[in-house]
Image (cartoon, rainbow, N blue to C red):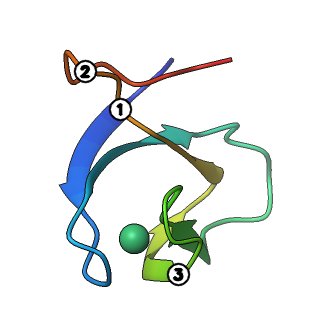
Amino acid sequence: MLKIYKTICSHCQKEYAYENRDDAYAGGKEKEEITCPYCKKTDFTKMTSGYFYSYKLDDNGNPIIN
Ligand SMILES: [Zn+2]
């Protein structure tokens, strides 16, 4: 299931979207980094059992997912 959140980068102040792709494999939660798609810096870390993917937003505020 896709869960997409929007946030504002603490480095460059641009809004972007990130997705928590929770694969729920055995092994438990780990800290994963959310990287800003604009400035490529690590914005923050969060506990998840999956991975985070970040996306730029288009002019309408929708994530650009390739
Ligand atoms: Zn940034």
Contact, mark 1 vs mark 2 (Cβ under 8 Å): no
Where is 10 relative to 26, above or below?
A: below
Question: Which of marks 1 and 3 precedes in the sequence?
Answer: 3
Residue 50 position in % (x across, y down): 65, 50
Q: CA distance from mark 2 to mark 3?
A: 24 Å
The structure residue drawn at horizontal position 57% and vertical position 20%, both measured from the top left corner, is 65
Residue drawn at point x = 68 percent, y = 17 percent: 66
Q: Nearer the viewer, mark 3 or mark 1?
A: 1
Where is mark 1, residue-wise? 57
Q: What amino acid does circle 1 point to?
A: Leu
- Pick whichever, 12 or 10, lies toward us: 12
Q: Position of residue 49 (x, y in %)?
A: 62, 56
Q: 62 or 25, which lies in front?
A: 62
- Please give the label number shown on residue 42: 3
For the residue carrying disc 2, how many other residues have a C-alpha within 10 Å: few (<14), some (14-19), or many (20+)? few
Disc 1 versus disc 2: nearer the observer = 2
Q: What is the total number of numbered labels drawn onto the structure image?
A: 3
* Residue type for callout 3: Thr
- Judged left or right of residue 15, residue 32 is right
Viewer-nearest of discs 2 and 3:
2
- Quadrant for ligand 1 reads bottom left
